[in-house]
Image (tube, rainbow, N blue to C red):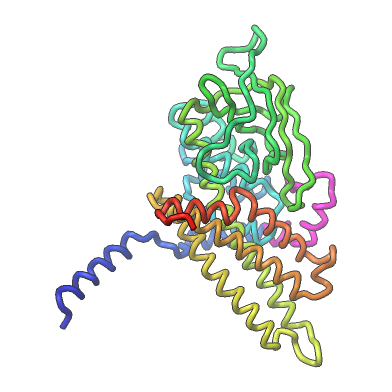
Amino acid sequence: MEGPAEVSEGAAARERDARLPDMTYREEEVQLRAAVRSVLDDRADWRSVLARTEAAQTYDTGLWQVLAGQVGCAGLLVPQELGGAGASFREAAVVAEEAGRALAPVPYLGSAVLATAALLPAAGQAPQARELLAELGAGTATAALAVPFATAPGAPPEPTVRIVPGPAGDPAGTYRLSGSVTGVADALPADVLLVPGDGVPAGLFAVRAAQAGVTMTPVTSLDMTRQLADLTLEAAPASRIAAGPAAGAAVTAALRAGAGMLAAEQLGLAERALEITLAYVKQRHQFARPVGSFQAIKHRLADLWVAITQARAASRYAAACLAGQDPDTPVAVALAKATCSEVALLAGQEMVQLHGGIGFTWEHPAHLYLKRAKATSIALGTPERHRAALADLVGLPAP
């Protein structure tokens, strides 16, 4: 018979388990995954992705129109009353995993996650935010958050764009912005740029990319499937989305959501890299036997599988916390981004090495996976940055 202490411990454990988010994939998430994977298998096989890296337009706008308009990926986080799906970060993470698997050259992270997450807090007060969310939800516009892609969640970065005086004929509510932002992700195909601007007060502003005074310069990026751009504004007209602390909070929320969804993308990348590598070592023969039958290869792939399984738990927990606005969200996101960054990089390295000579060639997709893994390990905070944040969040003393 259990004593009072054992009964108390059991009740406490059950209460703790009841508070944990459900990290399994629900039926609607499985169906969404199948729909997205079907499109990506048809239109974003690795040969098409590799060919796209050598084209003048590195983003596949046609593929994005299908995913955004027909599948509804662009409006997953947009409320239903604004024409979106009214889904959560759980569903958004599923799409991010599939985008990572395919290395899809589409602005899903920049538009459907970062920009949308920055607009959501302002939707109740700013009509401009609601209008933009409706456009994003319908798939008729694409947006990008104009901060350097390396920016980590936490305190919002100091704006490098300022409010400047405009001509006397400007309509009421029009602001003018001047300055530059380097290394912006998914800015090249964006119709709207969400720009943090310094002023009295500072704010978050929407700038139409096609307007005069807006210049975007492509950057030679390590990850050729997600090209960065430098943004320059010269008295560009803008409308204000949020002001003061609300603007900073919107950017912080967007960066945290982006880091969580980028961890999901890295998980998908690692899973696909393992699948491709496993298939190769089964059919590649050496000394009259598959190279995958050698014990050393088995151990390396088994270790990678364990690491991916652990990364999946961290990623799913972060997505569930973001979806439920759980108080543990900052901890979950920091843990997921640090873990998934390193696992994705390990998967990319093992993919190149275990493919032997062919893994080092341009014609094989291994280098694309390794480059995306390395680039995303730096994006939205390095693993070291997230581990340091995690230590602060849980009260661990510095070494």
- Point out the stretch of residues depicted in magenta: 40-63
Quadrant showing the N terminus: bottom left
Whether residue 277 can be seen here:
yes
Is 145 part of what is drawn in magenta? no
Q: Is residue 288 left or right of residue 196?
A: right
Q: Residue at x 47, y 50 (%)?
A: 88
Q: Position of residue 5 (x, y in %)?
A: 18, 73
Vertical comparison of 160 with 155: above or below? above
Q: Position of residue 302 (x, y in %)?
A: 60, 79
Whether residue 210 can be seen here:
no
Q: Residue at x 64, y 78 (%)?
A: 301
Q: Residue at x 70, y 88 (%)?
A: 293
Q: Is residue 97 left or right of residue 318?
A: right
For residue 18, what is the image quadrant? bottom left
For residue 157, what is the image quadrant? top right
Q: Is residue 258 left or right of residue 22?
A: right
For residue 146, what is the image quadrant? top right
Vertical comparison of 198 with 54: above or below? above
Is 60 part of what is drawn in magenta? yes
Q: Position of residue 67 (x, y in %)?
A: 64, 50
The one nearer the camera, 288 or 56, is 288
Q: Position of residue 269 (x, y in %)?
A: 65, 62
Q: Residue furthest bottom?
A: 288
Q: Residue furthest top?
A: 168
Query: How many marks can you see?
Result: 0
Vertical comparison of 126 with 164: above or below? below
Q: Residue at x 55, y 50 (%)?
A: 259
Dominant secondary structure of the magenta stretch?
Answer: helix
